[in-house]
Amino acid sequence: MAFGIDDAIAAGLKIVDKFISDPDAKIAAERELRQSLLEWDRGQQETNTAEAANRTLFVAGWRPWIGWVCGAAMAFQYVVSPLVVWGAALAGHPIPRPPTLDDMLWELLFGMLGLGGLRTFEKIRGVTK
């Protein structure tokens, strides 16, 4: 389940309810909270749009680059390395298995794929423009 701006507002309002008892002050705090979170969200959306529209690969390409690095690391770990070790053994020149990458790679991959899946779900539902 995605955690969106509405969820952040709801969580903030629970905190406001716990610490502010005066009804007028509570309304003012809720209004200020909503405004600041919506402004932050709008600013983040503008930043994302500017990054994606940038012609410089260094700016617009950092997310795809992380994806390619993760994919290359997975390919090395689970395809290339085992095939090279197996091929060398078949050729009569066994080599030691190279060091393995840790499980953080899986966490990165699942996080990236999960976020991409949630974004697709949001687009299908028409939540974002």
Image (cartoon, rainbow, N blue to C red):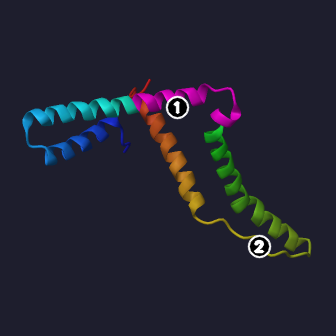
Q: Which mark is residue 83?
A: none
Q: Residues within 10 Å of mark 1 (few under 14, many from 20)?
A: few
- In the image, is residue 103 above or below residue 110? below
Disc 1 marks which amino acid?
Asn
| Labels 2 & 1 near each other (Cβ < 8 A) | no
Q: Which residue is mark 1?
A: 48
Magenta segment main secondary structure: helix
Q: Secondary structure at mark 2?
A: loop
Q: What amino acid type is highlighted by mark number 2?
A: Arg
Image: magenta residue range: 41-60
- Secondary structure beneath disc 1? helix
Which label belongs to residue 97? 2
Residue 92, how many percent across, how many down? 92, 76
Q: Nearer the viewer, residue 99 or 83?
A: 99
Left or right of residue 27, residue 76 in this image: right
- Quadrant location of the N terminus? top left
Taking the spot 85% from the left edge, 67% from the top edge, the residue there is 87
Q: Nearer the viewer, residue 47 or 117?
A: 47
In the image, 91: left or right of 9? right
Q: What residue is shown at x 69% (from left), y 30% (from top)?
A: 56
Q: Assess whether residue 35 is covered by the magenta stretch.
A: no
Q: Counting residues from the N terminus, which is met first, the one under dot 2 or under dot 1?
A: 1
**For residue 21, side relative to residue 58 (left or right):** left
Residue appearing at x 58%, y 64% in the figure: 103
Quarter where residue 29 is shown: top left
